[in-house]
Image: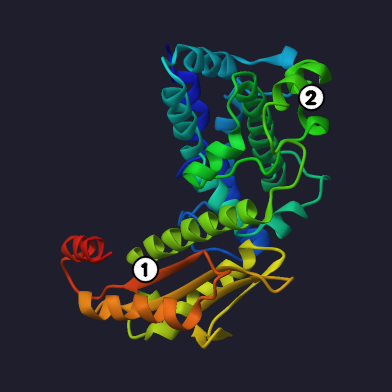
Amino acid sequence: MNRELEYKFFREFQYEGAAILVLKMAHWKYCGIGSEVPARPDFPEGVLAEIRKRTEAFDTWPWSGIANYCPLFDEIIDNLDYCVSDNVRVNYVISILRQFQTWTFLYSLGTDKLNSISNSVNMYSVEDYFHTWRNAFKSFAEKLTAILAMRGINILEVQNKCGISIIESISIDDLWMDFGTRKMAEECLSKFHNHDISLTESTSNYKVYLKVLQILRKIGRSFETKPSNYIGKDEEGIRDAFLPILEACFESCTATGETFNRNGKTDLLIRQADGSNIFIGECKFWKGSKYLSKAINQLFDRYLTWRDTNAAMIIFVKQDGITDIINKIKTNM
């Protein structure tokens, strides 16, 4: 197996790859999010030139349609068929999904504004490259879904397992061309209980919960490199930095702080329009294992009802020796 084609494609959706660079530029231009923009004196002209060069050099696009398999998917199919068991195959798929963590996270921060970019784009503009890479991403997700379904793997279940979502639903109407015929699509997807239908409430809420945790981790890592976000701030001050990012990520939900639920006010609450809670978070500074146990008991005793199944304790640590503290937290849990 030669995975050079895979790595070549995946690299562009990670870190400083062409897809990520153009997405950061689109954020800067359309979403007002500029903290992740590369601090280069030739931005955006020099970055665009670099993106153009890398994009034009990429000749293995996963265009849609079963008859149009590209070398990239030939390689992925070979690797899937080479796997010795279903478990190894699923782990390989998870490793693929993880390549897109940076892309899916950044894209989720400004979905509405990014989707509103006009289709009438100028050649070699940030909009042009945004469409190019987004269409490549969409094509990849749809074709990968079909290839996995042909091998009895439901990508939605794998996504729920690892908390990374590159495709929202499996629809025969949207995907049948990637199977070759509609009959083939129906035969493959009939094995799955959740094809062509909306996710159930519990599955959907859990999927959002995993996404919330992923976003909180990303924000936390960003804080580690930007001390001005937390120095001199109390729990409420740090928490308030989370709220606008969380709210921007969930179209039909509201993210609020100090919101009444059951017998107290929660630090973080994400609630759907129908009034159901998707996520409840409690923010605390680390003050020792005994204090943590008290905080956890408070979360269960005061803030959670029997319907609230997705909650988290968010711990801010000012002390040195973070590894020892993490081990104490694990022991305490």
Horizontal side, residue 254 vs residue 81: left or right: right
Residue at 77 percent of width and 43 percent of height: 122
Task: Decide: is 122 above or below 70.
Answer: below
- Residue 65 appears in view: no
In terms of depth relative to the viewer, which is nearer, 52 or 66? 66
Q: Residues within 10 Å of mark 1 (few under 14, many from 20)?
A: few
Q: Quadrant of residue 299?
A: bottom left
- In the rendered image, residue 181, in percent from the top left (x then y), is placed at 81, 16
Q: Of callouts 2 and 1, which one flags the residue occurring earlier in the amino acid sequence?
A: 2
Task: Decide: is 224 above or below 73.
Answer: below
- Residue 105 appears in view: yes
Identify the secondary structure beneath mark 2.
helix
Q: Are marks 2 and 1 in contact (CB under 8 Å)?
A: no
Horizontal side, residue 321 vs residue 44: left or right: left
Residue at 81 percent of width and 50 percent of height: 118
Colour convention: rainbow
Q: Which residue is mark 2?
A: 176
Residue at 38 percent of width and 67 percent of height: 223
Specify the amino acid type for callout 1.
Lys
Q: Residues within 10 Å of mark 2 (few under 14, many from 20)?
A: many
Identify the secondary structure beneath mark 1.
loop
Q: Quadrant of the C terminus?
A: bottom left
Label disc, if present, on residue 226 of the rendered structure: 1
Task: Decide: is 323 above or below 262.
Answer: above
In terms of depth relative to the viewer, which is nearer, 91 or 225? 91
- In the rendered image, residue 173, in percent from the top left (x then y), is placed at 83, 32
- In the rendered image, residue 179, in percent from the top left (x then y), is placed at 74, 19
Specify the amino acid type for callout 2.
Trp
In terms of depth relative to the viewer, which is nearer, 187 or 253? 187
